Image: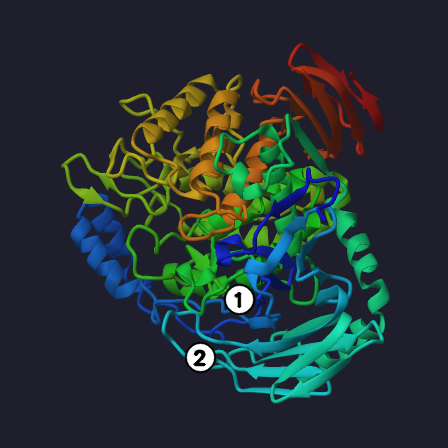
Amino acid sequence: MAPSNLEETLHYTSPAKDWSESLPVGNGRLGAMVYGGTSRETLQLNENSIWYGGPQDRTPKDAFKNLDRLRHFIRIGDHAEAENLVEQAFFATPHSQRHYEPLGTLTLDLGHDPAKVSNYWRGLELSTANATTEYEHLGVRYKRTVFASYPDDVLVVQLESSEKVEFTIRLSRYSDREFATDEFVDSIEAQDGTIVMHGTPGGRNSNNFCCVVSVQELAGDGNVETVGNCVIVNSSKAIIIVSAQTTFRHADLEAKTLTQARKALYSHADLFKRHVQDYNSLYGRFKLRLFPDAAHIPTDERLLTAPDPGLVALYANYGRYLLISCSRPGDKALPATLQGLWNPSFQPAWGSKYTININTQMNYWPANVCNLEECEDPLFDLLERMAHRGEKTARVMYGCRGWTSHSCTDIWADTDPQDRWMPGTLWPMSGAWLCTHIWQRQLFGGDHNLKFLQRMFPVLRGSVQFILDFLIKDSTGDFLITSPSLSPENSYTDLEGQKGVLCEGSAIDIQIIKSLFEAFLFSVDLLQINDELTEPLRLARSKLPPSKVGEFGQLQEWLQDFKEYEPGHRHTSHLWSLYPGDSIHPSETPDFASAAEVTLRRRAENGGGHTGWSRAWLICLHARLHDADGSLGHVFRLLEDSTLPNLLDVHPPFQIDGNFGGCAGIVEMLIQSHQIDTIEVLPACPKEWRSGELSGVKARTGFELDIAWDEGILTKVLIHSRLGRMTKVVLPDKTVIINGIGDHRLV
């Protein structure tokens, strides 16, 4: 029943009772959550361009004329007047960007009484990206395999049984709200073994969609019959193909989806082989094993006890699986949302949008280091569209050149303020943060990525241009700062004891700007560009305020030493320069590293890390401080407190960012390369992970490593250098210098 190798398999001994126990499959665009039922099999379907409504024009038209007044109120600490003005002139109307919706639900009515089912097993095999369900019912053996094919761009359900059996297939799109009976479709029709569903999400200029379910009997011992709007199959072997498209990518929807389904059915014998070959070209590049490994224990049961090292490795590998499954390059590719690809709700938490004050960025933290750089391509596609739309936002709201964006964006690359929430809405630094991903891609790939840097340089330059125009002098005239500013979603108590949100020059703003400016200077040098922004940027950089240590020994979150209104806040924005930034390091900047330690301790003492993604960030931060025990403690808390039975992250509710942040943090405990020309091996590996293997892991400036250790002793360190840069490799017991293209075996 179960595969012999369970190290990279999520597996269970009963069907999913609800969405939190179902298993995700996806090809980057089209996905499903698979329940593995016996009486009824359910696949909750998603297609990543089904969103409520089309593009909107929401830019606050009176923002710029009120900008000087707002800056004045912020400077004198008049919080009430500042916030009142923001509500009047800076919040957008409509308040919300568009939100992501489900495609529908595919059900297979099987009629197998769970009380009469035996030898049940279901699992998600990460090495082959398929969800399998197997069991016996009244002496008949059943097996279903579900996978999402990227090369054929369809979902596939393969069914086998030891005898001919009958089941009914239905396609629907019902509301997910309790007691609601609405079905959000335009039509559902079935004919000749095929169901065709058309729909129009609400809102003006929505992307219309078409979903096709086609069935073929394969054993030659049965038949497929269409009755009403469902399909009845009587066979011992059959295949179901699900295809879906929207007008976001194609005009003739039904023709496109029918053609995709028919092509897949015609070549059904090779579907799985093509799928696995394609998937393993990505997943197979990297391998992580940690020992001991209790892989034989069902996954949901493993979560009930102290996590064994093997479960930690499974969680990290699952993060890679999820990234491949929800973010692949292609025609009008879209990045992973707050829920990745898998959203079951018509009114999802936070709109299942792209939250770009940490969450979308965190989705892509594992991409480079885990050897999946092309999985980040959809983010850069969106970033280019944001840069175009963000020019209007920058000009109309702030009177600036270049482009900017705020705390969220959507399928239409909306860059205007989202929501009417003072601690989060008016933060025009998200675009600058996203632009640092451009330089990180370049750092990992080196000269190999020059064409990419040339393509993305106008986006990077536009963000720099906005920042140069947006910066103003502080009250002393000595420094340049941002205003309006905030520390995302946090509040402070000012020196007069009043609660405040808006501020000048929050720590994260200045840290991001410094990193952005460095990326620009490196880029113009690498691309040999004589850019007119270079000298103004150098001057502005010299006038940015330094980081400060506050009265408690903590890294200050605000320009003034304000107290945190919520000391255990989930965001640790002022530690951006520790991770994902790179300007704080225990040996290079020990004072700031110590201040970061104090900050983390104070957050922990006051309940910090209570959301899944926040806990994942803490893993990364402690790893950068070489705090193995601290990182491991947060790994345990992530798995124990913020992980669903299907290993998806829970905020709560479900958000996928914690999976990706956790994956990145686990790898960061084993390999770091953020210091210039330095690679650290096992910098924060806890003694509990006494043995392990890591291969195909990427390091900045063109390196790839294979390492292994046994009982805490390195047994293999093999480094492949594509560019030949001289680099210092820091091992637990020695430091080695390598130089030259090719393989370098150090242990």
Q: Mark 2 points at which residue?
A: 203
Q: In the rendered image, which residue does mark 1 sit on?
A: 411
Frontmost residue, 527 versus 269: 269
Report the residue at 37% width, 69% height from top: 178
Label 1: how many Cα within 10 Å (few below 14, some 14–19, many 20+)? many
Query: Residue 367: which quarter of the image?
Result: top right
Q: What residue type is labelled 2?
A: Gly
Q: In this view, does 703 lie to the left or right of 219?
A: left
The C terminus appears in which quarter of the rendering? top right
Image coordinates of residue 256 in percent, x first then y, are 72, 80
Which amino acid type is marked by label 1?
Ile
**Residue drawn where x is 85% and y is 70% of the image:** 267
Question: Element under label 1?
Answer: loop
The spot of residue 481 in percent (x, y) is 37, 41
Relative height, residue 26 to residue 699 (above, below): below
From the viewer's side, name the closer residue of 320 and 191: 191
Q: Residue 731 sits in which quadrant? A: top right
> What color scheme is it?
rainbow
Q: Is there CB contact under 8 Å for labels 1 and 2?
A: no
Residue in view at x 51 percent, y 47 percent: 645
Q: Which of marks 1 and 2 is nearer the N terminus?
A: 2
- Marks 1/2: CA–CA distance: 14 Å
Q: Nearer the viewer, residue 633 or 446?
A: 633
Badge 2: few (under 14), some or many (20 or more) residues near its Cα, within 10 Å? few
Instruction: Name the spot of residue 680 as percent of width and height, x first.
Output: 64, 22
Q: Which residue is drawn at 72% across and 40% down?
A: 445
